[in-house]
């Protein structure tokens, strides 16, 4: 069963090992002793629904609560600390395009708005009902999860858009294919959600971001259906797929999507390497990207992330032994860990392996072929559960991300780290902050930052700490020419920063597309862009 408070399902836990808890105490301070608000209290506080009845819509309070928020830090404070005060008035599980057209008409007549719900893994406030104004209907696409067509001639598959990561891979792998899109939220995110938020999977270097994988699809908008034919490449004017990509439900509900698929790789390996410091490691990673070495992923942790990964592994003896070995080979306190993947046929992976080893060694790096890479692979969808345990013991954890050209990446990353690291100095609160470069291109890379701080005694204090850190970091990102989001999207939290990336005319273009397909503003109002600033 999916958790109402926190990430993932109730059956899975990721305990914080005792030495790691001690490490956090030493770095960020002893955590406050706090308890989540009981779910029964949250349910009691839900106001009566403001929607007329409809056979496809339930007004069950637990359903309304489950669909009230996503996974952003403010969402967590709302759901766990009991600040949640806006709820969808109803929840529906359509099973076909016809159901969706019916629901759009119902919303138009009832003066309601619609919030499509994929896996609920949004981390930027995409799913929050506005609260004031028209009633809201959450449209959960969980029942639209079928494989409609597998085209083995063109290497394409068409799915209903509510298919989740595990369902999609299971359907493809049965026939020897994969999409290869593995965001860390894979377990609880959907194809439709990936497309409309421009998601990026962990092996994007090999498989690509979701944009090149999205070949075509079908969108139901308040103004009618929009078909995006599956054409390999076209010079016939602007590509309408790019309007739907990143549209965050403002244009309608994506009901079907055709994606490019590949044969399952013959081989896949994950290995690690260490560099004496971040600058050297980042230079090696830039070379890997620019030499276009056929690796499937690279992830270079800074020294703080490397150390924290060691601490959180719970393998105290092994870690001490590893550190001794690394020290001997000149990888000391500032050491940075690179995780990399090799995916493909045997000849390609072997060639990539040799080329990578050469590049690592020529940058004072040291290869570690056993254990670390495999462990990362084994736990890659488990690590998000750590956020639950940390929260329960009194720490709030959040992440943010950007991408920057190589010539600005180091300076931009450092500025963000400094802004967060000193962001609560006025309260004398330390913040643990670390980062990695994880998606690389020939001209730049993404910087992914994780930060951890003590929850406040009062939920409003937790929220205000987060707001300070988020605002400081976002400002530094913009000053250094980075994007406000490389992969999480805009939602509510990034909206104030969008105009500086798109410019006034760009904002008007997006607004006019939304107005054209949704003149009544019933689709996820208030997210991505304000139509009446
Ligand atoms: C632990 C964790 C790890 C994450 N890791 C990554 C990562 O590695 N890479 C990455 O890119 N992101 C990551 N994310 C962010 C998030 O998973 C992505 O934004 C994901 O694409 C959202 O998909 P979803 O199905 O959960 O959408 P939801 O969260 O349900 O919805 C997100 C937005 O999409 C809209 N939407 C959903 N489905 C449809 C549809 N069919 N038609 C129209 N609109 C729709 C919703 O209305 C909403 O506006 C992570 C989040 C978490 C919590």
Image (cartoon, grey):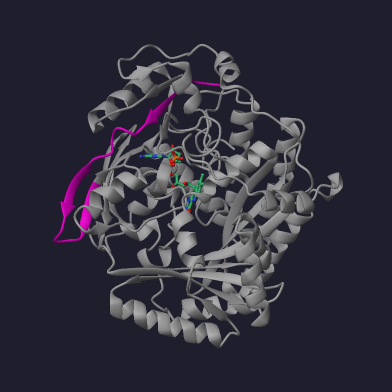
Image quadrant holding the N terminus, namely: top left
Q: Is residue 431 left or right of residue 337?
A: right
Q: Position of residue 326 (x, y in %)?
A: 64, 76
Instruction: Please check the rendered image and state whether residue 371 is part of the magenta-colored stretch, yes or no.
Output: no
Q: Ligand 1: give its quadrant.
A: top left
Residue 89 at x, y = what percent? Answer: 47, 19
Q: Is residue 128 above or below residue 341?
A: above
**Quadrant location of residue 173?**
bottom left
Q: Is residue 374 above or below residue 195?
A: below
Q: Residue furthest left?
A: 153
The correct choice, above or below, for 373 with respect to 251 in the image is below
Q: Position of residue 531 (x, y in %)?
A: 52, 37
522 vs 88, nearest the viewer? 88
| Res 137 quadrant in image | top left
Magenta-colored stretch includes residue 133: yes
- Which of the 4 quarters of the picture holds residue 107? top left
Q: Quadrant of the C terminus?
A: top right
Residue 203 vs residue 291, the one in the foreground: 203
Q: Position of residue 505 (x, y in %)?
A: 52, 52
Q: State left or right for residue 279 relative to residue 355.
A: right
Identity of the residue furthest to the front in this view:
317
Q: How many marks?
A: 0
Left or right placement of residue 122 versus residue 166 in this view: right
Q: 418 above or below 95?
A: below
- Residue 406 visible at all: yes
User: In the rendered structure, which segment of residues is drawn in magenta?
Assistant: 132-158
> Could you tell whether 495 is left or right of 212 in the image?
right
The residue positioned 68% from the left and 78% from the top of the image is 327
* Residue at x-position 59% and y-position 50%: 499
**Residue 483 in view in this figure:** no
């Amino acid at each position: 069963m999916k958790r109402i408070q926190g990430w993932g399902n109730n059956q899975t836990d990721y305990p914080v090992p005792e030495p790691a808890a001690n490490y956090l105490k030493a770095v960020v301070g002893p955590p406050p002793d706090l308890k989540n608000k009981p779910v029964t209290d949250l349910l009691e506080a839900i106001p009566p629904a403001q929607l007329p009845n409809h056979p496809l819509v339930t007004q069950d309070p637990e359903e309304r609560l489950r669909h009230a928020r996503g996974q952003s830090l403010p969402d967590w404070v709302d759901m766990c600390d009991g600040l949640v005060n806006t709820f969808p008035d109803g929840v529906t599980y359509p099973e076909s395009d016809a159901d969706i057209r019916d629901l759009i008409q119902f919303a138009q007549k009832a003066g309601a708005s619609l919030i499509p719900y994929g896996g609920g893994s949004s981390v930027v406030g995409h799913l929050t009902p506005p609260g004031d104004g028209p009633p809201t209907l959450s449209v959960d696409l969980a029942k639209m999860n079928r494989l409609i067509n597998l085209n083995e001639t063109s290497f394409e598959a068409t799915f209903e858009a509510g298919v989740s990561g595990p369902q999609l891979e299971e359907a493809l792998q049965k026939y020897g294919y994969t999409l290869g899109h593995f965001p860390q939220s894979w377990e609880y995110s959907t194809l439709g959600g990936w497309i409309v938020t421009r998601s990026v999977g962990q092996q994007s270097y090999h498989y690509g971001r979701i944009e090149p994988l999205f070949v075509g699809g079908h969108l139901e908008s308040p103004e009618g259906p929009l078909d995006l034919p599956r054409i390999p490449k076209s010079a016939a004017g602007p590509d309408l797929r790019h309007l739907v990509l990143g549209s965050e439900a403002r244009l309608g509900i994506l009901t079907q999507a055709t994606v490019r698929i590949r044969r399952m790789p013959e081989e896949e390996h994950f290995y690690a390497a260490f560099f004496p410091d971040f600058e050297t490691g980042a230079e090696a990673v830039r070379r890997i990207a620019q030499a276009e070495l056929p690796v499937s992923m690279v992830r270079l942790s800074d020294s703080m992330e490397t150390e924290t990964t060691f601490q959180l592994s719970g393998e105290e003896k092994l870690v001490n032994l590893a550190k001794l070995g690394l020290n001997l080979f000149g990888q000391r306190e500032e050491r940075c860990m690179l995780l990399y993947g090799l995916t493909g046929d045997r000849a390609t992976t072997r060639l990539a392996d040799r080329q990578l080893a050469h590049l690592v060694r020529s940058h004072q790096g040291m290869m570690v072929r056993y254990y670390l890479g495999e462990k990362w692979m084994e736990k890659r969808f488990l690590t998000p559960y750590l956020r639950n345990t940390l929260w329960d013991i009194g720490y709030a954890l959040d992440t943010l991300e950007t991408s920057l050209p190589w010539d600005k990446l180091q300076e931009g990353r450092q500025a963000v780290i400094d802004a967060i690291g000193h962001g609560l100095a006025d309260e004398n609160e330390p913040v643990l902050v670390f980062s990695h470069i994880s998606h690389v291109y020939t001209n730049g890379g993404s910087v992914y930052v994780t930060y951890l701080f003590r929850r406040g005694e009062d939920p409003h204090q937790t929220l205000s700490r987060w707001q300070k850190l988020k605002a400081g970091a976002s400002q530094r990102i913009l000053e250094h020419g980075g994007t406000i989001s490389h992969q999480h999207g805009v939602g509510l939290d990034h909206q104030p920063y969008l105009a500086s990336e798109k410019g006034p005319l760009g904002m008007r273009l997006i607004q006019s597309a939304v107005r054209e397909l949704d003149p009544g503003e019933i689709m996820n109002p208030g997210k991505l862009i304000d139509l009446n600033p």
